[in-house]
Image: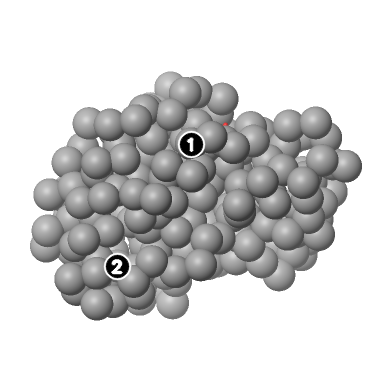
């Protein structure tokens, strides 16, 4: 069943010179989770942050860290992100040779496991792992950068995955990531998403606007 909408602001759009303050500000503004985009300059054409930054941010909030790993090979970084304080660890199927094993490792570390699908990756990729995971992340932009436009073909994918989740009857979160704003959030929720990642749309206008921005996305 689709659960109440949760908002997971992506700190990729935060002011990196004061990340701790930014995390506290979005926590106070009503963020449900904190979305951390980890990029390696190889799996995606951008380079962001590593486990040391996640660890440094951990004391700034008690909200779940929703860590989106866009790194390949991913397996040898799972333990480091778990130890740094990740609560949800999401990987791409293309980021390692054995997705099922990667998921088992995340769960063995006591973390919630997510699988993320790029815009060109079919929902079918989930067929033999859906029952093992806690979250599906549908990328509505090609991964690598904030501030891109929502790819509307992904709404069909969200609808298809919503049906699969409901058929299974397990409370798996269905998260959408990329180009989520005041207009596209409604379409994503109507298609079946129940977690919205938003970078640009959360951080737009500076700290005094965060609560209002999050409120708009929550609808
Ligand atoms: O994973 C990614 C990009 O690869 C995202 O989490 C973006 O950081 C979302 O940014 P906006 O599209 O909301 O600006
Ligand atoms: Fe992300």
Distance, label 1 to label 2, CA atoms, is 26 Å
Where is residue 105? Give x, y as percent. 32, 68
Tag of residue 90: none
The quarter of the displayed image where residue 2 is located: bottom left
Tell me the crowding category of disc 1: few under 14, some 14 to 19, or many 20 or more residues within 10 angstroms, Cα based.
Answer: some
Where is residue 200? Give x, y as percent. 63, 32
Query: Is 149 displayed left or right of 171 in the figure?
Result: right
The quarter of the displayed image where residue 31 is located: bottom right
Where is residue 68? Give x, y as percent. 46, 48
| Residue 47 seen | no
Q: Nearer the viewer, residue 155 or 175?
A: 155
Q: How is the image coloured?
A: one colour
- Element under disc 1: helix
| Residue at x 58% of width, y 42% of height | 198
The quadrant of the rendering that contains the N terminus is bottom left
| Residue at x 64% of width, y 35% of height | 201
Mark 1 or mark 2: which is in front?
1
Q: Does the residue labelled 1 lie within 8 Å of ligand 1?
A: no
| Residue 198 seen | yes
Where is residue 43? Give x, y as percent. 35, 31
| Residue at x 29% of width, y 48% of height | 158
Q: Name the residue under label 1.
A: 184
- Element under disc 2: loop
Q: Which residue lies furthest to the right in this view?
A: 208
Q: Are marks 1 and 2 in contact (CB under 8 Å)?
A: no
Q: How many numbered discs?
A: 2
- 154 up-or-down from 145: above or below: below
Tell me the crowding category of disc 2: few under 14, some 14 to 19, or many 20 or more residues within 10 angstroms, Cα based.
Answer: many
Q: Name the residue under label 2.
A: 133
Query: Is 97 displayed left or right of 200 in the figure?
Result: left
Query: Is 212 displayed left or right of 53 in the figure?
Result: right
């Amino acid at each position: 069943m689709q659960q109440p909408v949760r908002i997971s602001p992506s700190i990729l759009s935060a002011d990196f010179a004061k990340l701790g303050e930014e995390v506290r500000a979005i926590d106070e503004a009503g963020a449900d989770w904190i979305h951390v985009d980890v990029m390696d300059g190889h799996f995606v054409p951008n380079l962001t942050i590593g486990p040391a930054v996640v660890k440094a941010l951990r004391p700034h909030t008690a909200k779940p860290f929703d860590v989106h790993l866009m790194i390949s090979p991913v397996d040898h970084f799972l333990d480091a992100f778990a130890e740094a304080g990740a609560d949800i660890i999401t990987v791409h199927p293309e980021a390692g040779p054995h997705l099922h094993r990667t998921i088992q490792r995340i769960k063995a570390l006591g973390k919630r496991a997510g699988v993320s699908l790029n815009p060109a990756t079919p929902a079918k990729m989930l067929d033999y792992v859906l029952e093992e995971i806690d979250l599906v992340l549908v990328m509505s932009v090609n991964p690598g950068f904030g501030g891109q436009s929502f790819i509307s073909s992904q709404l069909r994918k969200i609808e298809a995955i919503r049906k699969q989740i409901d058929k299974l009857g397990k409370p798996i979160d269905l998260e959408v990531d990329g180009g989520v704003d005041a207009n596209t959030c409604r379409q994503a929720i109507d298609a079946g998403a129940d977690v919205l990642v938003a970078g640009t749309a959360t951080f737009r206008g500076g700290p005094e606007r965060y609560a209002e921005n999050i409120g708009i996305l929550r609808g």
